[in-house]
Each structure stands twice: as C-alpha cells, then as structure tokens.
Image: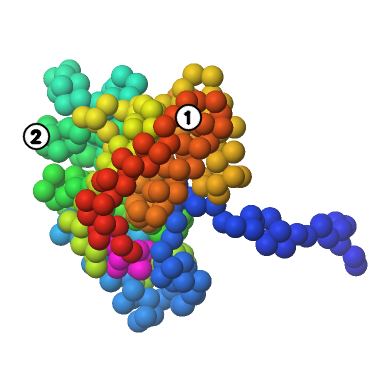
Amino acid sequence: MSPSFAPPQTVPLSRLLPGEPLLLMGAGPVPLPPVVAQANTIVINHIGPTMEAVVEAVKRMAAYAFQTDSRRIIGLAGPASAAMEMAVSNLCWAGRRVLCLKSGTFSGRLGEMAEGVGADVTWLESEVGRPVSLAQVRTAFEAGRFDVVTMAHGETSCGVKLVDLPDVCRLAKAHGALTIVDAVVTLTATALPMDEWGIDVCLTGGQKALSSIPGVSLCAFSDDAWRAVERRPGVRPHWCYDAVRAQRFWGEHHYHYTAPVPGVLALHEALRLVVEETLERRFRRHELSSRALQAGVTAMGLSLFASPDVRLNSVLAIIVPDGVDSARLRGFMSETFRVDISGAFGLNIVRVGQMGEQCRSHHLFRTLHALGRSFVHEGVKLDVPAGMAALEEIVASDPGIFAP
Ligand SMILES: *Cc1c(COP(=O)(O)O)cnc(C)c1O
C-alpha cells in the first residue's frame, strides 16, 4: 500500500543557514566556546558509570557557580522557562500566596506560571526601567502574608538589575516566605551567592550567561525549599518537571526520563570553563566588557535606557532615537556586518548581550562598529570613531582579562 501523503520537498540545512554565521550579540543565545560546541555533538548512554561521573561533576561545578552547599542541584531538559516552571510548580499550588516582583517580561513570567498552578498571586510592579524596590516589598509584607516571593535578578527585557535582591531575600526569610530567583542572565556574570543571600530556589538556562546551548537548564533548591517540595499536597502538575522525580536521576542516577545527553555534556564544558576562569575573573570580565561598551555607545552619541544605579552588566539596553526603525536597523546590521542584536518587547530600545563569550574584546569592537555604522546608515548623526576610542581606552586598561 502506498502512503497517502507524497514526500515533501527537501532542502539541505546548508542552504537554509547563512554562508557566514551571524555573530550572536543579542540577549541570547550566545556564541559557544569550541569545547562546548564539540561536547554537544556526543551521545553516550544516559545511565551508567560514565554519565554518573559527568552528572556528579556538573553538580560540583554548578555548586561553585551558584555558591551553594545544596545537594539538590537538578538539571533538566528544557529552556530556562522550564527551570522557572520547575521552581514555581513545585513550590506553588492552590491556596499558596505568591508575591511576584515584576519589572518586565521575564520576572512577570514567574507570576503567570504561579497563576497557572492555581496560586493566589499578588503583583508588585515597578516603574518602567526600574526594578521593584525593597520599600515596595516591605509595604507588601506589612499588608499581607506570603508563602513564596518570585523575582528575576536580571530583567533581560529592559536591562535592569534587581539591586535590592539580597535585602529582599532577607526580608522574605524573616517573614517565613521562600524565594525563587531567576538568575538566567546573571549567574557567573555578576555576584549571586545563593547561600549567603539566603535564596531558596535559584535557576538558570544554558544559552545566556553560562554560554552553553539552549535546552538544558539548572535549578538549585535550599533545604527549606526542598522540605516544601516534598510536602507539596495534591497530584503534581508536571511529570518531567516534578523535582522529586527529577532528583531520582540527578541525585541517585536512576532513570526518570532520558537526559538530554549532548546538552549535559555541553553544560559540563561550559561550567568547567567557568571554574577554570574563576568567578572573580569572570565577574571582572563581564563588568569591564559592559563598562567598555557603555562608554563606547555613549561616546558615539547614543543614550542608554536603564539608569546607572540599576543597570545590568549582562544585557545593555540602548535607546533607539526617534524616527529610526529598529527592525530595519537590525536587519541592516545583520546583512552588512553579520552581527545580530535584539529588539525589545514594546520598548523603543535595542539590546546587546554581554554574557559569557560575548564579553571578548574582538566581539566588542566588531559589534560597536557595526552598531554605530548601522545607526549612521539610518540617518542618525553619530561620532563612530569617538565611540571606538572610548571602547579601546577601557579594554586597554586590562586586555588580558578578555583572553579566551
Ligand atoms: C531568556 C530568559 C528567560 C527564558 O529563557 P528561555 O530559555 O527562552 O526559556 C528567563 N529569564 C530570563 C531573565 C531570561 O533572560
């Protein structure tokens, strides 16, 4: 019997991909170090002594990245949003009171997920371009009781950092609430000591600050958080993202579902690079890279969106001058210079990522030049050489820090 559907036309991947890959300088995914890309091509058995050794090493290195003693660091197949889902759905359920600190798309997503599992969500929103403040959180705790507080350390949609995060976590703890922190763009890019700051669940994805592939993410649970996970009443809403089931694989090496083996191997290499660089040097590289780019962008004549006191060092939001079409600008930049940056969700900004491999000096020079020339092409009067000189001045202050 012949099948009723005719075979469709095929196109080799090489014809779909650009001849020269774009340099990924947007808000993620980010370029992969060669050892990470290489690891991502390997498949081994997901059960057995070799995989056990890999998983144990991933947990040990991730504990350093999170700065935690926790024995419950769980990897999962899925984007960073899946790690958010694991954190939220294991700690929130009908009747739980959740305080969601919202300053943009990603911090808001945590609250949407809490509503999705039936929790009673109170929204605490910031002004546009600002994070939620400690004073707002204090007022919320004076008015009500909460079981869980959710927040993003870095709000990627507008390049804003929750600068009061340590105090917010301390306040939540004093009121007996658990904290969920999205560290997707901040873990290993800036200080985020999970245990010292008393964070209960800290999560990240692969393709942002860690410079690994998208699709394998991490979620670390404190002892307090784990007690709540184990006591969760009712039927668990997710099977794959059930932390208790997932811990069977990540804690005891028993089958849960087939782990995304190449992605776990890639994550191993990404974390190894973090450990070998050391957090101190990696923070400094991110800080200097961001400062250099900020100096270059402003010296050219463009303006930054977030004010300096709350500016994230891993995603830089740049104001698009009136009359410039952001999509056309980015299209020209990709086509002419093979450099890819991000637009935004509703705001008139473009965003340049400063995460992991993006923070190398050769990428900074190429990106700033491409950005400047593209704005000039769109009719904006800019002093591109002044911007390049300002970038060079800061990069030259510590060129060794940028070396791969
Ligand atoms: C990108 C991002 C996410 C979501 O990541 P996905 O991998 O697309 O699910 C969540 N939080 C923050 C802060 C992000 O930047």
Residue at image point 54% right, 52% down? 22
Q: Main secondary structure of the magenta part?
A: helix
Quickly name the residue at label 2: 174
Quickly name the residue at label 1: 345
Horizontal side, residue 17 vs residue 223: left or right: right
- Answer with the quarter of the image where residue 237 lies: top left
Farthest residue, direction right: 1
**Magenta stretch bounds:** 267-274
Please tell me whether mark 2 sits on a helix, a strand or a loop: helix
Q: Give the mark nearest the N terminus, 1 or 2.
A: 2
Q: 23 and 223: which one is in front?
A: 23
Residue at image point 37% right, 37% down? 387
Q: Position of residue 185 (x, y in %)?
A: 33, 45
Q: Quadrant of the C terminus?
A: bottom left
Q: Residues within 10 Å of mark 2 (few under 14, many from 20)?
A: few
Q: 163 and 88: which one is in front?
A: 163
